[in-house]
Each structure stands twice: as structure tokens, then as C-alpha cells.
Image: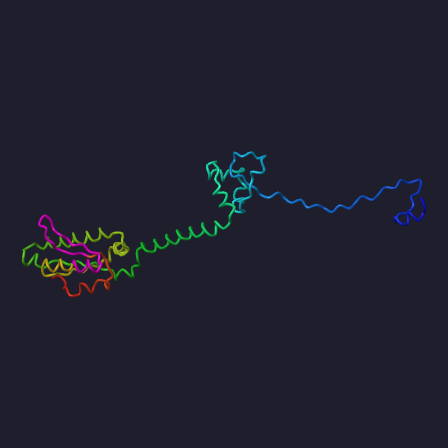
Amino acid sequence: MPQGYWGVLGHTQPSLTSTWQPRPPQVPPVRILPPPLRFSLSDREETSDRQSFRPISFCLCRTCRLYPEGCLVSRLTFSCSAGWLEFMASNQLFIWVVLLPWLNFFFLTALLTRALYLPTPAGSMAALVQYVVLRRDLQAGLGWPLGALVAQACHAATAAIHLHYEHPHTRAYLGQLDTMHKVVLEVADELTLTTLGETLAQAGIDHKLWVEQPENVATCIALRPYPKEEVHKYLKKFKLLK
């Protein structure tokens, strides 16, 4: 072969005593990525069937990596097909749009319920008072003994507490047994007592009109515990029982 040919190829003419070998091609390194996390919705599916594996959200994958394949989700779905669960797991919007608002709603509801039904502090208990209104003519006109009058007031007050036991004011009132405050007033007769009951009912004031049996005689009215400023205007014209 002529000398010019080797010069064109960029090689020197090989000697007769050596064997020429071409330089191996330079192959760039190939990065091998780990396979993506995939999960089966049922542990009964064959692991060789890779077409049945579908990717799910990162949160669920991370939770289930420590468990056998399909174990956790199959427990939740009782090893049955559940397309809705796969949709929720793969759709991240479910967490932000449905799950978190639902949890926040019940959390706030629990906080509000707890705040409403917790007993109020001792400082605000002084404002709660239970009014008891008793007929004056039971003793003066009808000759009832003093013990019977006290019993009528006790009946009415106990009944009012029982009927409205779940109210926050009642719970707070009973929570401070040593500081309970009652005001006992008097009315002239049965007509005045029943008229007062109608007035309280029209105003939406919780109360109990006690009717003594078997005489069927209205004897007393007791309100549930109220802040004084809420009910004082309905009772300010009546005097203390003497």
C-alpha cells in the first residue's frame, strides 16, 4: 500500500513484525435509575404481572414500603377491588380538598363544644342567679305551714334544674356548689303567678311552673340559672318573700 494512503488515514504504516489492532470505541457511562415505586391494590395479584401495578401517591408508598406488597391496602379494602381507593391514593387533591377540611371541621366542632360546656370560672359565677317566685297567700290566706311553703320552692327549683340540666349556665351554676345564689320573691295570688308564667313563656325565659298535686294548685315558679341582667327586668316589680 502506498505511503500516501496511510497518511490520509492518519496512521503510520504498520511494520511487518507487529499486528495492528483498532482502538476500541469510547462508550459514555450509562446511569441506571432505580425502578419507580409501584404498588398493587390486592395481594392476590401475581407479582409477575407488571401491567397490573399502578403507581400511587408518595405518602401511601412511603407508609407501605415496610409492609408486604399490597398488605396495607388490601387490609383496608378487605382484599377486594376498590377503584375509588386507588383514585384517592393517586389523586393528591383528595388530601387537600376533602380530607383536611373534613378533619378541620370536626376538630373545630369539638373545640367549640368543649368551650360551651366547660364550667365557667369562679369569677363569673357571681352573675348567675336562680329566681324562685312563691305565692304569699298560701300561708296568709290558705293557712299553709311554713314547711309546706319551703317544700314548694324546693320542688320548683329542683324541677327547673332538672329540665335544663344540659344548659351551660346550669352546669356552671352546679359546678360551684358553695357559691350558689338564689333569690326568692313573692306574688299576691295564683292569678299573678300564672300571668308571670305566661310573660316568661312569651319572652323565651326557661322556667318551671310547679303545680301541687293532688290539689292541682299552682304554687311556685322557678327559673333556671340566668345571668341577673337577662331576667331582672321581668321580676323587678316583685318584692322579696318575707
Q: Relative to the observer, which residue lies in front, 173 or 107?
A: 107
The structure's colour scheme is rainbow
Could you tell me which residue is drawn at 34 percent across and 56 percent down?
Answer: 115
Could you tell me which residue is drawn at 93 percent across and 49 percent down?
Answer: 4
Q: Relative to the observer, which residue lies in front, 162 or 108?
A: 108
Q: Position of residue 94 (x, y in %)?
A: 48, 49
What span is colored magenta in the figure? 197-222
The answer to whether residue 240 is above or below residue 96 is below
Q: Position of residue 107 (x, y in %)?
A: 40, 52
**Dividing the image into 4 quarters, which one contains the N terminus?**
top right
Q: Position of residue 158 (x, y in %)?
A: 19, 52
Could you tell me which residue is drawn at 9 percent across and 61 percent down?
Answer: 188
The answer to whether residue 81 is above or below residue 10 is above
**Dividing the image into 4 quarters, which one contains the C terminus?**
bottom left
Magenta stretch containing residue 5, yes or no? no
Q: Relative to the observer, which residue lies in front, 138 or 44?
A: 44
Magenta stretch containing residue 200, yes or no? yes
Q: Position of residue 8 (x, y in %)?
A: 89, 49
Would you say 224 lies left or right of 63 here? left
The answer to whether residue 203 is above or below residue 35 is below
Q: Relative to the observer, which residue lies in front, 210 or 8?
A: 8
